[in-house]
């Protein structure tokens, strides 16, 4: 379960860091990803990243002393869908030359890490099921 916790922490750091930059310094982020949009759009997306970071932080706090595989699993599913959506749509935007590939470079590995963590949890869940039936 330590590897899963580590993956959640990596996601937490990335989401809160990028979200904070997007909210507090939207022009800097616009330059990084080559987006020529009003700052308010970048800030709105940053608030979503901060919300996802909050979800991860709450999950980590809730499971610190009392592991709750269902809560961790649910959080990882949300993170997988979030990072998948960003990877796909940022990838389409980058492919069309509208933005840089930076978002895909960040979110695609996060998605793969979340899928790996879900597989690890699935194995843990199967081990617990086998033990409880024995």
Image: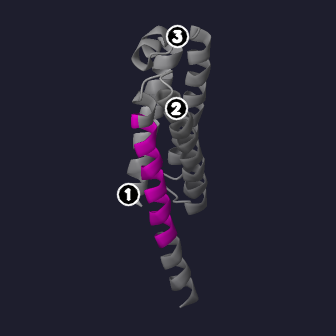
- In what element is the residue under mark 2? helix
x 44%, y 20%: residue: 33
Nearest-to-viewer mark from 3 and 1:
3
Q: Nearer the viewer, residue 128 or 89?
A: 89
Q: Looking at the picture, tell me which residue is in the foreground, 65 or 73.
A: 73
- Which picture quadrant has residue 109? top left
Part of the protein shown in magenta: 105-123
Q: Earlier in the sequence, mark 2 or mark 3?
A: 3
The image position of residue 24, as x and y in percent, is: 50, 12
Specify the label residue 36 is tagged with: 3
Residue under the point 52% across and 10% down: 36
Say which mark, if any, is on residue 2: 1
The secondary structure type at the circle numbered 1 is: helix
Residue 126 covered by magenta stretch: no
Q: Nearer the viewer, residue 51 or 66?
A: 51
What distance separates the C-alpha of mark 2 from that of mark 1?
Answer: 30 Å
How far across and how far down the image is residue 61, in percent?
Answer: 52, 45
Q: Reading the chain from its start, which is encountered first: label 2 or label 1? A: 1
Q: Marks 3 and 1, how far apart in space?
A: 41 Å
Q: Which mark is residue 90?
A: 2
Q: Is residue 79 visible?
A: yes
**Quadrant placement of the N terminus:** bottom left
Magenta stretch: helix, strand or loop mostly: helix
Q: Residues within 10 Å of mark 1 (few under 14, many from 20)?
A: few
């Amino acid at each position: 379960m330590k590897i899963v916790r580590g993956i959640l922490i990596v996601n937490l750091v990335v989401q809160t860091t990028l979200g904070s930059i997007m909210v507090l310094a939207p022009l800097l982020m616009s330059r990084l990803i080559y987006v020529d949009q009003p700052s308010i759009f970048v800030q709105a997306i940053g608030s979503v990243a901060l919300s996802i970071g909050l979800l991860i932080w709450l999950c980590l706090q809730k499971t610190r002393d009392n592991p709750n595989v269902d809560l961790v699993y649910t959080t990882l599913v949300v993170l997988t869908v979030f990072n998948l959506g960003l990877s796909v749509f940022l990838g389409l935007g980058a492919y069309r030359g509208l933005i840089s590939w930076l978002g895909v470079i960040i979110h695609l590995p996060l998605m793969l890490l979340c899928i790996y963590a879900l597989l690890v949890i699935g194995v843990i869940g199967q081990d617990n099921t086998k033990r409880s039936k024995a």
